[in-house]
Amino acid sequence: MEETITEIEADRWEIASPQSSSLSQDHLRKMESSIEAGELKKITSVIVARNGKLVYEKHFDGSTLSLRNTRSATKSVASILIGIAIDKGLIQDVQAPVLSFFPDKQPVENPDPRKYKITVEDLLTMSSLLECDDSNQFSRGNEERMYLVEDWVKFTLDLPVKGFPGWTTKPEDSPYGRSFSYCTAGAVTVGGVLERAAKMSLVDFAKVNLFDPLGIRKVEWQYTPLGMASSAGGLGLRSRDLLKLGQLYLNHGMWNGKRVVSEKWVKASTEPHAQVDEETEYGYFWWLKKFGPTHERHAAYCMLGNGGNKVCVFPSLDMVVVITSTNYTARGMHEQTDKILSEYILSS
């Protein structure tokens, strides 16, 4: 326990009891029992910060130092980095045309003048005109097809423009004027935009501008076949460091009194820009959802990843919750961690 406290102090977390933050000990004990009994499957950690204090932490695999592969939660990290790049003037704004960053990767397959109007914002909101849908195995842009080729950015830029048959909703008829389809290839390309704009690797840019200011010392990136770090998935971070990212946004871009990313970007990236379904909206690689018992739902913006991994920020409760899991590709993986949030944490 002494080692754990020392590490927490090094991370500058002030510790408070769950009771002091209105978290029910009974609910938390029931949650722990369900996880340890395997009723809630493959949950590796649950951490809660409230009012800027660490109020609950449990690592069910016994390790506080394990790097959690939270899969597509990486996309939200990419969003933070794009915001920092815009703050620094490296990218003019989210309306910057994507193809302007890649003079050497202009579309050879499926050339179309409309591609030159695709913006960084289109990629950040999963609503570009590129035919790319990870939920459709027949999609030309499905991520599994991308993994088979060497140049993932070129793969993305060469995709055809999608069509909208009569039974689908066109962008102009959709909420926020955008038609959402989940596209990992677009998220990879966002990382390429950042590297071209910053004239340095994604790894170095993230270290200097995000991880070092937050005291995040251990990271593990996944790489594309050409050696670029993937901005779309697989970034390994400690559970406590994931908590820092959520707290950074809850603090409007501040960490320990220092500005890391602008408040303007935090606000813009966590506002709705596209509608996923009747219960979910989407910002700039952030998911906007509500959790809690049916009589009292609380709005959150979240980093989400395969397995049911979640980093959720609840502004109205001044609370950040991290849930990590290795329940990858399993049916009900997100419903399981939704249940932890709603029935065991928020029901308090």
Image: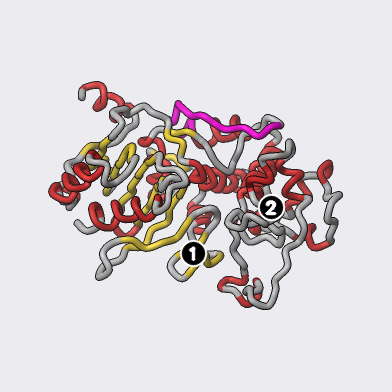
Percent x, y for residue 183?
62, 53
Could you tell which of marks 1 and 2 lies nearer the N-terminus? 2
Question: Considering only vertical position in the picture, is 337 above or below 131?
Answer: above
Which residue is depicted at the point 31% across and 31% down?
61
Which disc number belongs to residue 15?
none
| Image label count | 2
Residue identified by numbered label 1: 281
Residue identified by numbered label 2: 141
Which residue is depicted at the point 74% across and 55% down?
97
* Secondary structure found at label 1: strand
Taking the image as shown, residue 72 lies to the left or right of residue 105, namely left
Percent x, y for residue 31?
22, 47
Characterize the magenta stretch by its predominant secondary structure. loop
Please tell me whether residue 39 belongs to the stretch shown in magenta: no
Percent x, y for residue 93?
65, 54
In this picture the colour scheme is: secondary structure
Taking the image as shown, residue 218 lies to the left or right of residue 56, namely right
Q: Amino acid at mark 1?
A: Glu
Taking the image as shown, residue 228 lies to the left or right of residue 266, namely right
Percent x, y for residue 198?
68, 38
Which stretch did the figure color magenta? 211-225
- Foreground mark, 1 or 2, reads 2
Please tell me whether residue 218 belongs to the stretch shown in magenta: yes
